[in-house]
Image (spheres, coloured by chain):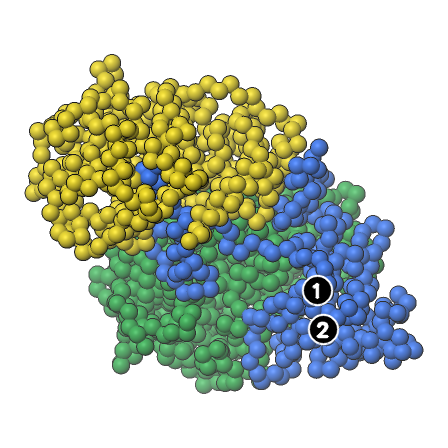
Chain colours: A green, B yellow, C blue
Amino acid sequence: MRKLPHKDVAIIGLGWTGSIMAHGLSEAGLDVIAFERGPWRDTAQDFPPTYAPDEYRYRVRHELFLRPAQMTFTFRNNPSQTALPIRDWGAFMLGNGVGGGGLHWNAEMWRFEPSQFMLKTHLTERYGAKFIPAGMTIQDWGVTYDELEPHYDRFEYLCGTAGTAGNLRGAIQPGGNPFEGPRSRPYPTPAQKQPFNATLFAKAAREMGHQPFPQPSGNMSQPYTNPLGVTLGPCTFCGYCEWFGCGNYSKASPQTTILPVLVKQPGFTARDNCEVLRIVLDAGGKRATGVVFVDTDGEEWEQPADLVLCCAFTPFNVQLLMLSGVGEIYDPAAKRGNVGRNFTHQTVSTATAFFDPATHRFNPFVASGAIGMCIDDFNGDNFDHGPLGFVGGGYMGQVQTNGRPIETTPVPAGTPTWGAKWKAAVKQNYNSSVYSGSGVHGSFYSYDDVFLDLDPTYKDRFGRPLMRMTIDFHENEHKMSAFLTDRYAEILRAMGATRVDKLPRTGHYDVTDYQTSHLCGGAVMGAEPSTSVVNRYQQSWDVPNLFVIGASSFPQNAGYNPTTTVGALTYWTLDAIVNQYLKAPGPLVQA
Amino acid sequence: MRKLLLGTAAFVLLGAGALAAAYVATDPKLPSGPQAESHGDAQSFSEVEYGRTMLTVADCAACHTAKDGGEPFAGGRPIETPFGVIVSSNITPDRETGIGTWTDEDFADALWHGFGKDGHQIYPAMPYPYYTHMTRRDVDAIHSYLKTLKPVHKQVVSDTLPFPLNIRLGMRAWNLLYFRDGRFAPDPAHDDVYNRGAYLVTGPEHCGACHTPKTVLGGDEAGKLYQGNVIQGWTAPNITGDRRRGLGSWSIEDVVEYLKTGHNRQAASSGPMAEEVGLSSSRMKDEELRAIAVYLKAQPGQDDGAAPVPASDPAMRAGAAIYADSCASCHRGDGSGVRGLFPTLAGAPVVQQLDPTSLIRVVLQGARSAATPSAPTGAAMPSYDWRLDDAQVAAVVTYIRNAWGNQAPAVEAGTVAKSRRAFAEQAHPVE
Amino acid sequence: MLILNRRRLLSGTALVLFTASSAPSRAGTIAGALPWAPGAAAPPRPVVPGPWHFFTPAEGRTVEAIVDRIIPPDPDGPGARDAGCAVFIDRQLAGPFGRAEGLYDHGPFVTGTKQQGPQSRLDPATQYRGALRAIDAYSAQHHDGRPFVDLAAADQDAVIGAIEDGSLPIEDVVTKDFWTMLLKNTRQGFFADPVYGGNRDMAAWKWIGFPGARYDYSDWIDRHNEPYPHAPIGIAEAPLWRPAASK
């Protein structure tokens, strides 16, 4: 294996976290190299407005995503089953290429609620320890909302987030989310305009006593130039957002906010189509000396570096730790190890509402990825869980992102799936129904039997074990989903729907059923090395010159989209590296 | 035969005769200009710094540094010409392969008269017909700076043109016809700012090389300085004070911002101009850019009295549909664009040039706009060559040239077809 | 003239150097500036009508008959046959989709739970081939030896019903998984952009009122509950873009 010249920093993955870290550290004067498994992706050449609006290519054939042949997982619902490989993607999508998930997301830009960061303490104090279901392994994050607030702010201003503040330094603001944590200043841009369906939803919710507000959005409501000098254009509501790259520079992504200045940093280099196979440790296993990657010719290279940052997507961060021998892999039976523990996803549900075509014409194709009016009345612990017998919650809203007809032709439950009746129902309802894929965005708390480890049977193309996902819904999530979906359906009925079909999350977790790409945990952060893989700065407890950055750090997943919290944690860690670690390399928290 | 004729015309293109009024012919060996006595002092920090500044203004790096990681000023960059490719020379102070043995006199002789140290004639790809207007101080300063560079040992064979164009003797005859030697002399009828602008534009910046229209034989068209030209598949637009097609509708600040950042409230530079902005004008002082703006805006424009193509024209109607479905999501329905990202089309001089070559090019091939420190976005226009046929490109280009109060000649499908072939050939030259 | 060309034009060299060093599938290094080259990286290549690429003529007729029962013609809108769904499926099966390109194909192949997703060792092209054979065999067995195409509509529907409920056996294929794929592919062909060979003349989009590959509804976000007046456009073409059509 050939060795490349030494760099100060090696970054694995060039999505949101990788590009933020690369920019910050090269600005601090370091030589930074970033490895990206997929290709470089450019707006005008890879997804221009001319061929970006191609539902079949991008939504169905997964143009921008990792191929399972390149890397996949095995999956089972519980440890008694034999895990089988995920041969084609379904329940979640894995971005591939520069920009990562930040390229194909909807850009729904939520902050987590302050109590989320002290979830176990908070719920125990309010409801008592016995209220937390058996087997649930939620914990505090080791970092607080107040500590993260400046970093939330920084990420929102990087992205130009469009929204209406609900809590400015403690003062509740009209029209915003009254449940949000205090923010130090308003959103950088005003909220997006709203389509008919969202407007009806807000009116109905308000009349029912809820407190609707526009979803915070990384789709621009107006042109915006961020603090780095990079300009985004106004969203044109094309309805090709999630699963697609944005062709007119109007969705916040690494491409539209940070890469133009990052590539000009003198100390920065990116290598695309290069897959990092493992982190190299010294003989004692207490220090990372670099990474090994493979190029498209199958040639392996070693890149020595002083600092290694895992900035890949959640399960890949965890997998790199497992395959590199960093920390101990979680074993639920023996109750040992932390790598792979507290893996979570999302508990998404929805309801479809049908209206009279003579009076309702929604034009569902006029949409953006993060459009919509929402309520937060039933999220986190914003409502009394005492009588309900579950914990967790979610925001809900009329957040319909598209009218693309392969995906979005709602018909009433019970309609045949083919033939003349199906066809008539499609025609009848296409423009007079509302369907939000994730109308109810429920939390997914962590359990001792939901985890990642290495599969004993199936191998990747290099002969290494695939990572195995063991994941299912628990009674708590089923109860929560039923309750939230009922509340959501009530609002849809109040909008004037003639029929509402509820689709609560029931039964087992199904790997063929898409419900966001919000995989979280597996390398979680915390105050104690006994229950976490990284400390409050996302620094490995075991290997202090290794940081593992992203939603892999979440001890459990809240009822929100995770990216804004990922961005905040990234800036928080960047600050810690620049202001503390570089001055005195070593553990930032003593174990 | 055709090739030879083209070659002849091309050689004639350098004629800078129209500029002569502004200059005083002098003995080539005698220094002249504002600070004639000041010779270069390679040891002086301020002299070297000044030299670096002037080297930026004269944009030497554009040719003498090879693309993609070439050693600075070690040459080797291919310069495309209609009759072949020549390669820029090594101007680092390497004694064997660079200009390490050159004296200040040798260097001035090269910039002012186009003679190399051994007396051979340099191809006018090196713009000595413009540099001849530079002061000795500026020429010496550039040389002082170049002497501080790391010598790079790199042999460059620049003489790669086919017979008979490789006979450098021919250049002497050409010079007799078209080269006017002489330093810049200020025009007392104008103030210092104007004169500073005149010096920069006609000397080191050599704007006319691209932006002045040429006669059939390649000479500057009399009375049409800076009124726009076509070079190598790009339109070098009108940069006079003309209100429709030139800089007349731009304020001094607009021009300065454009040269500084590659962008302003209306425009985004791409192609060769984006390169110029990145390497040269974005690194210049605001007061120098202001002087350039003052001088250029004072140059007379053209009044061609063209009438707009009527909206009822079939091409305009198809163009409007194509525009709405293909262009409006960035440039907006009213052609207003988005500042810093998507150029304004309504009222924009760049879309109303008499020549549509650049418009056809960016529609067919796309283009990356300039990314500069103060406007780093570098947004790109996508390519439409796979989506629109020649008639459709002609229609949409005709539309943007005549919508929203714009007016410029209609573009024919045949013109697009020719451009399409030429661009393809340029991207994949036939050996 | 040489002087006019003194600035080497970016586009020419950039293309050569870019494709030499970092074409889409090759490892490359990016530093200093955003990469750019003239042209589009991967524009769509429209399907050209003509003979079947994957199906035999008999298979093609069977698929046309099947999809036309899944999405039948009616006075209001096209059926899947006229919309070109069979052509769409044919071209897809002849391409990467048919070969299961990019999917995970390591064994062992074990049938798992519904939640674990399809585990077939056969690629879609092979599954289709086997299924079409099985469909004709099933038709012959239940309808006097006649192949699917020769059945009356109601009998054809009964055969399709047997695929849907899994009672029609297909060798080495989970019939319900095949049905899911067939149904999806038919709808995809019906509603995908016409460049893929289906949704001919954007007929399916016109039928439900979907405006297609448009990218700008800025003027429509505020116009609630109003009919959207513009006809659909495709990625590669729209009738109004033809100068002649505008006369």
- Give the image location of residue A282, x and y in percent: 27, 78
Quadrant of the drawing holding the C terminus of chain C: top right
Q: Nearer the viewer, residue A545 or B104?
A: B104
Q: Is residue A370 above or below residue A522?
A: above
> Which of the two residues, B46 or B223, is positioned nearer the viewer here?
B223
The disc label shown at residue C128, or none: 2
Chain where mark 2 sits: C
**Picture coordinates of residue B77 (x, y %)?**
30, 49
From mark 2 to mark 1, how far is it between C-alphas? 10 Å
Q: Amino acid at mark 1?
A: Ile
The residue under the point 19% across, 33% down is B112
Count the numbered circles shown: 2
Q: Which mark is residue C89?
A: 1
Which quarter of the figure has residue A185?
top left
Query: At x 50% / y 62%, what residue is drawn?
Result: A95
Q: Which element is circle 2 on?
A: helix
Across and down, in percent, residue B380 comes to 45, 45
Q: Is residue B21 above or below residue B324?
A: above
Q: Is residue C230 visible?
A: yes
Circles 2 and 1 on the same subunit: yes
- Point 75% across, 79% down: residue: C170
Marks 2 and 1: CB-CB under 8 Å?
yes
- Disc 2 marks a residue whose amino acid type is Tyr
Which residue is drawn at the image coordinates 13% and 51% (left, top)?
B95
Locate the N terminus of chain C and report the quarter of the image it occupies.
top left
Q: Residue furthest right?
A: C144
Q: Quadrant of residue B222?
A: top left
The local secondary structure at tag 1 comes to helix
Determine the chain carrying the residue at label 1. C
